[in-house]
């Protein structure tokens, strides 16, 4: 009888921990070091933002749009995904259409803040998004070219990534 109670308690605890990681609309989820706010977008997807983000879901104003921005680290996004997701996990995630990553780039080309756009019943956990955010900040940077001064706090870029493309190789 004691074994049955212990086994039942173990499974209930496991289920509770697994659901605590699930991303749910209109909620805040705790990851290892930070919290993520989840809201619904008009198209039925969720936007997931680190609560420490200055911008959250609001795009900063860009006054001077006469500049070019290009990646300084062509393999950086691929490297970030491979740091966080093992191939087995990437295969599981290929059932999802994609993950959209809204990257806010500073005038120096550094990734400052990140929002993630995922489907409402995503398999991705808050801890995986936290790891991916950290890996992108470490591995991805941009070059900004302009004849004028670039007048913005952070410029938003959106990258759509297919998990199947990450599995195929470094061109994502």
Image (cartoon, grey):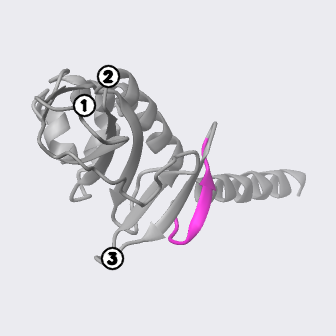
Residue at image coords 24%, 35%: 150
**Label 3 near label 2: C-beta < 8 Å?**
no
The part of the image, by quadrant, that contains residue 171 is: top left
What segment is highlighted magenta in the picture? Answer: 24-31
The residue identified by callout 2 is 139
Label 1 secondary element: helix
Residue at image coords 88%, 58%: 1
Q: Quadrant of the C terminus?
A: top left
Q: Is residue 164 left or right of residue 27?
A: left
The part of the image, by quadrant, that contains residue 122 is: bottom left
| Residue 169, numbered circle | none
Label 3 secondary element: loop
On whether residue 154 falls in the magenta region, the answer is no
Q: Label 1 vs label 2: CA separation? A: 7 Å
Position of residue 53 relative to residue 166, above or below, is: below
Position of residue 88 relative to residue 102, above or below, is: above
**Label 2 near label 1: C-beta < 8 Å?**
yes
| Residue 44, numbered circle | 3
The residue identified by callout 1 is 77
């Amino acid at each position: 009888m004691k074994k049955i109670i212990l086994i039942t308690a173990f499974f209930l605890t496991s289920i509770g921990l697994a659901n605590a990681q699930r991303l749910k609309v209109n909620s805040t989820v705790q990851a290892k070091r930070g919290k993520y706010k989840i809201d619904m977008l008009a198209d039925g997807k969720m936007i997931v933002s680190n609560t420490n983000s200055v911008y959250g879901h609001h795009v900063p104003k860009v006054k001077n749009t006469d500049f070019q921005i290009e990646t300084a680290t062509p393999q950086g996004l691929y490297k970030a995904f491979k740091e966080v997701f093992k191939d087995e996990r990437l295969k599981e995630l290929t059932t999802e259409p994609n993950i959209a990553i809204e990257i806010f780039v500073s005038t120096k080309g550094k990734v400052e803040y990140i929002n993630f756009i995922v489907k409402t019943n995503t398999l991705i956990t808050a801890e995986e998004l936290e790891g991916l955010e950290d890996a992108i900040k470490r591995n991805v940077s941009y070059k900004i070219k302009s004849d004028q001064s670039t007048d913005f706090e952070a410029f938003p870029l959106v990258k759509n990534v297919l998990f199947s493309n990450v599995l195929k190789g470094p061109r994502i």
